Structure formats: structure tokens, C-alpha cells
Image: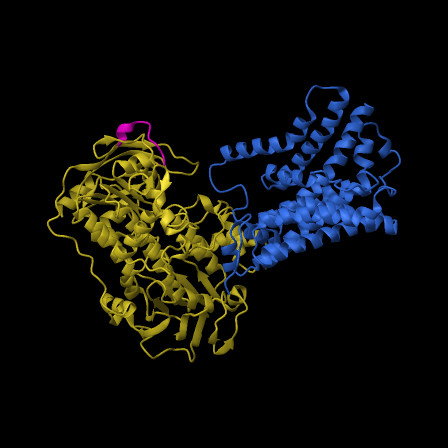
Amino acid sequence: MALVEAIILAVLAASTPLLIAATGELVAERSGVLNLGVEGMMIVGAACGFAGAWLTGSIFIGALFGIVAGMLMSLVFALMTLGLAVNQVATGLALTILGIGLSGLIGAGFVGERITPAAHLAIPVLTDIPLIGRVLFGEDGFVYFSIALIVGVWWFLYRTRAGLILRACGDNHVSAHALGYPVLRIRTFAVMFGGACAGLAGAYLPLAYTPFFIPGMTAGRGWIALALVVFSSWRPGRLVVGAYLFGAVTILQLHAQGWGVGIPSQFMSALPYLATVIVLVLISRARTGGSTAPAALGTVFVPDR
Amino acid sequence: MLDPTPDGQHSDKSPLLRTIGLSKRYGDFLANDCIDIDIWPREIHALLGENGAGKSTLVKAIYGLIQPSAGEIHWQGERIVLSGPSEARRRGIGMVFQHFSLFDNLTVAENVALGLDGKESFKDMSARLEQVSKTYGLPLDPRREVWQLSVGERQRIEIVRALMQDPKFLILDEPTAVLTPQEADQLFIVLERLKAEGRAILYISHKLEEVKRLCDTATILRGGKKVETCNPRRETAGSLARMMVGGEVKEVKAVSGRKTTVPRLVVNDLSLAPAEAHGVRLEHISFELKGGEILGIAGVAGNGQDELFAALSGERLAKDPGTVVIEGIAAGHLSITQRRKLGAAFVPEERLGHGTAPRMRLSENALLTGHAASGMVHRGFIDTAATLRTVDRATETFDVRKAKRDPEAASLSGGNLQKFIVGREILRNPAVLVVSQPTWGVDAGAAAVIRQALLDLAAAGAAVLVTSQDLDELAEIADRIAVMFHGKLSAPLSASEASREKLGLLMGGSSLEPKEVAHAAGA
């Protein structure tokens, strides 16, 4: 029993950064922008988040630092790809490389420092319920926020006019422009939202997951978040399922090693990507027309004036 | 009947919209040069001109999509500077685009919502959508996604979307290019009704007969300048065309004494399940096409023409090889390349994305269809000089106008790209040419060149199959005309007996069953 609870708790903790980062990227991609710099924005978010928390002693301010850092990174990306119409793939990759270097620089002075990690919710009685108590009522704030975030994004995309306009930009930017929507401005906001989420997801790592900062601590989670968006076929509902599934695989991999199961850990690490490929194949077989991905995803748009 | 707006007499004091010296410059290129135009209420005003004459630029400026470089726009007597289309819509200017401004992966209702200012709830908007579409006889299912719809239905969305803004002034950019005569007639009824409601309409079209029938005033543009404003009813199609072109338009002439030879394309009882959920099932299609003959296939878009094209071109394979016979060889199971080697050539409807790869150069696009049988590839290596020669020959023979020798396909205007595509295939001297919508959205000059090329090809002994929604075009070039409806092909009628009425009936799904035929025979 205790082991099951421990595993669930571990899965939730491992999934939360994936969910937050992927939610942001989903919004950006739905507007038609492919930002491959998630890993870079996350790692800068982690370094700045830790710095903020260490300097102020507040996890909340640390998280804000992470958000702002991710946003600034994404602004660089937006300036390049939307302002100057540079290729999005190349810029995204460059952003990741930049982020890894920058985070090392910012975080260098903080390596070896420790902070008090984010507090977990504690409600008398409820939190003490066996098995589900700590899972439902004993998490840290990030976990609850991530769920609110994805629900909010779903509501925004499918229930608000602004969300409809954002999806329209991702489907056909020429038409959106012809109808008078400021495609580039909308995309800039979407990219910045993606950056904020990536920064927060990165900050989660040193603020809640492990209470210290080490260079490169995102360890490829940004790439998994990108795969996750594709896995979800750009739908918020499936994104939640995918995030917990991918998180579970990560945890399973650790336990499998502990139990001495004879599956190479490299295979387990590759599972999220393998699952993404399989899902892509299944989707393209099941769908008969239209496109699953936002039709304008990754394409450059220069309005004529 | 009295003309409500005889020349020079308008019941209103000032025009609804007036442009004064409107100019738009792109670099060195003057797309619009000092254009003055007056639009009055209760007026259907035609805007005529060849491709590249500056019609689209002018309406984009009026709709606030681009800012004019010089000149003024006056709306209801007051000078305005439009910040964008949403302001234009707010003031009562609506627009129906030629290349639809629709979102394929969104539903009809969502597409309409995007064209409105969003002040009403989605639910109210959907209800009003159904009401407007019913009032004007433009039926739409709000829940379907656009990619599932035919071209005609897509245009309906655009029109309904514009009407829902209750515009005082509506711009339509070549609305009938993709419609059947009946659909066009329905549209004219809608337009007449809008006019009677006091609205003004700016109507861009290439079809001069249509303009003469519908429009009260016509403004003709040529090379970015206004040539003339006239009453089209007092002009002939010929005089309008002369003003557009600035000279005589070449008449399409059939070579007399064209002889038909052996069957070169035979389709035997071809049935094919649809490839996608909303596709059309082809049912028992049979016809025989001899060399020297042009067979026209009429029909409303989305009745199986695309599916038939795919089956003939080899984009989809038939189970039974004998269903498609090219040059006497059963080819139903053969690939596109193998069919090309048999002497067939194909021109699909969609120019960008199907007929050409938009971001590739013309020479590369020539190679894409010519690699199999035109000597452009030697031992796996591309003969770049040969591909360029093809481009040059097509350019010369078919008067393809372009900025440089070998530009990207997407940079050409629709008419010029279509001339290139048709030219590319014809220069291969095909025995069989299957061409879909050869002059879709193409100006009069280019259309004449293309039709003449098809006639000449048939005169040289090739079998030509033309799918078109333009009945005038089919009447002009086809020897026989068959109609597609719900995946079935009617028996071909000879061009002389294929009246618009008969074809219209077949296109609407009524059969010319014994009763009808007997009636026709008795008459």
C-alpha cells in the first residue's frame, strides 16, 4: 500500500513539469508556431527560479523569476521567428543551446546551495486518508496549478473567442490576416505564454522536485514535453493523459532498475518517444481528411501591407 | 422595366463609396495608379480587368487590408482611413474572397464567427447563421468542418458570413468562377435581392455576359489604371473585352475537319469506393474517347470528378486493370509514371499543391511530371538544361508571363501558372490528356490560349478529357458532353444537342430517362 502511494506521488511529481511545459507549447503550436526551444527555456527557468528563491527565501517569488526568465527567452524567439521571419526550427534549436549555456552561467554561483522546497498541502483528516489522502490533498502548489492550467487552456481554446482566433491563426494565417486579425501579435502572445509555462516548469525542478540546482537538471524534459504535444495530437485532454503516462514511464524506469527487471534503462527512457511515433501512426491511419496538426504549424508568415 | 439608376441620376446625393486618386505602390511596381471610382447605393458595380490589372489590390485597399500609398477613400461623404478589415466591417463594408479566407479544420459556425465582431454569443450567432442561410436560400450545416465541403459550399460560407454583418457595401471577388449555372443563377437572385434592399455591390468577374446581365455600372482597369466607367448593358461582350485587353481578344477557333481515330482512352464499368469518409463512390462509369476528340465532363463540384481524375491519373488504382484502358493497354493497375509512359498526361484542378509544388522552381516542376518520358533524366541524373528548355518552350508557346526565367511556381499569377502547367503537359505530345478545370480563375486572355491549345492538341490526334464546371467553356471546345452526378456519369450528349437546360437537369440529378428523352425527341 505504502509503495503504491509512493509510486503515485512520484509519478505526479515527475509528470507535473512535463504537463506545465507541454501546456505552454501546445498553446504556441496551436497558434502556428513551433518552438523547439522548450528545453532551453526550462533550464533557464530552473536556474533563475532557484536564484530567485535562494535570494528572497520565497518559493513563490522563485517561481515568478522562472516564469519571467522563460518569457524573456521566448521573446528572443518571437523576435527572431515572428519579427524577422527566421526559420522556426533552427531558431528553436539555437534557443535550447543558448539556454543551456545561459543557465550554467546564472546557476554557477548557486550550485551546492540548498533551499526549503515548496510546502505540501496539509489538511487535517483529509490528507491522512490512506492511499488517496496525500495524492489528492497533500501535493505542492505546482501540481494543483498545473491541473488548473490545462483546464484553463482547454476552456480558453474551445470556449472563448480569443481561443478560436488563436486556433484560426494556427490553421490558416493568410485567412486570419485577411479577416483582419493581427496574426503576428497573437502568435507573439502565444509564444510568450509557452515561454512562461516552460520557465515555470523548469523552476519546478529546483523549487519542488529537488531542493537544489545542478546544471543540466532538466535532463531532456523539454524534449519530452515537445513529444508530448504531438502525442496529444494538440488536444488538451489527451495532453493530461500523455503527461501522466510519460511521467509514469520515468518513474517505472527507476523502480524497474531497483527491482532488477532485465529491461535496459535506455529502452525505458526511449519509451515516450516511441509512444509518440506509434500514436502519430495510429492518428494518421484513423483520420480520413483535414489535418491533425495545426495546418500552419512552423510556417513563416509575412503580412503584406 | 425602368432602370432605377440611369446614367448620371442617382436618388442619393453622394456616392456610398468614392476613391479619389487611389494609388498603391509595391517597390517600383505601381499596382494601382490614381484610381477614381464611385459606388452608389442600389448598384451592382462590375470591376473588370485581366489578371494583374489591379482589381484585387483596389478591393484590398477598400477593405482595409492594405494601406494605399496615395489617394483618398470617402465613405458616405466622409473621408476615412481604414485601420484594417475589422474597421471596414464595422462601417458596413463586407468582402467575399476569391481564394476563400476559410479555415479548413474549423467548423462552418466557427468560420462564420471569425468573420464577425464577436459581440453576440456563439449560440446566438449559430441561430442567426441558420436564419440568414435560410432567408437567402444558401443552406449550410454549421457543425461540419470546412475540409469536408465542396467548393460551392465553401463559397456559401463566405457569402453568408458577409451577409451576417448586414453590410451596406459588399465586395465579391469572382464569385461565380466555381459555380454551376444554376448555382450562379441562385447567387444572382441573392445579389438582386441585396440590391433591392438598398445595398451596393462591387462585383469582380471575368464572365462578361454575366456582367452585362447583372451589373448596372462597370469600371474597367488595365495595367493598374482606370480605363473606363460605362454601362455594361450598352456594351457588347466584345467591346468590354477590348477595353480590358486594350486590343482584340483572340477568338478560340476549332480546326475544321478534325477526324476522330482509334479509341485512345476507354473506361469500362469503373467503380471505386471513396478514399475518404466523405468522398464520392464512383459507380459503373464507362466511356470511350477517340483520338481527335474532346469529351467534356460537366457537373457540380464534389460529384465524383476528383475521384474520377484520381482513378484515371493513377493516383488511385482500380482492382481490375481492364477498367481503364490507355492506348489499348489495360492500365487500371498501373502507376502514374507507367501511365505517363503509355502517353497519358494529367492536369489536376488545384494548381498549387497538386499541379505544381508551390515552392519549387518551374524547371523542377517540369521535371516532376516529365521525368518518366521526356528525356530529362539520364542514368538517374537530372539534365538541368533540358528542364530549363521545357520551361522556355512552355513560356514561349503559351505566353507565360513571369519575372525571371525560372521562378518559383507560387510566384506566378493563376493564369500564367495554369498556362505553364497545361503547356508543360502538351509539350510532351500526349496521346491522352486528362485535364480538370483548365481555366478555373483564369483571365479571358489566358483562358483563350488554354482552350485553343486543347483544341489544337485534339486536332493533332490526341484524345482530350476536360472536366469543367464552366458550361460555356465545354460548349466552346467539347465534341461531346457527359454529366457527373453522385459518382455516376450520364451518357455523353453531342455538343449540338447538349443545351444548358438539359445539362442543368442532369447536373441537378434529374435523369433524361425515356420520358425526358422522348419529350426532347418529340419536340
Please say whether residue B66 is visible from this viewpoint: yes
Question: In this view of the protein, which residue sits in the foreground, B369 or A2?
Answer: B369
| B61 over A131 or under it: above or below | below
**Region of the chain picked out in magenta, as a range:** B315-324
The image quarter in which residue B86 lies: bottom right
Q: Position of residue A244 (x, y in %)?
A: 70, 34
Please say whether residue A30 is visible from this viewpoint: no
Left-right relation of B81 to A259? left
Question: In this view of the protein, which residue sits in the foreground, A250 or B441?
Answer: A250
Left-right relation of A123 to B177? right
| Magenta stretch holds residue B319 | yes
Q: Position of residue B19 (x, y in %)?
A: 43, 75
For the view shown, which residue lies furthest in the left direction? B257
| Magenta stretch holds residue B116 | no
Colouring scheme, one of rainbow, by chain, secondary structure, one colour: by chain
Left-right relation of A111 to B409? right
Q: Main secondary structure of the magenta part?
A: loop
Q: Which chain is blue?
A: A
Q: Which colour denotes chain B?
A: yellow
Question: In this view of the protein, which residue sits in the foreground, B350 or A286?
Answer: B350
| B474 over B13 or under it: above or below | above
Which residue is depicted at the point 48% across and 63% down? B166
Disc count in the image?
A: 0
Q: Position of residue B43 (x, y in %)?
A: 37, 70
Q: Position of residue A232 (x, y in %)?
A: 61, 38
| B384 over B90 or under it: above or below | above
Left-right relation of B427 to B352? left
Which residue is depicted at the point 40% across and 62% down? B172
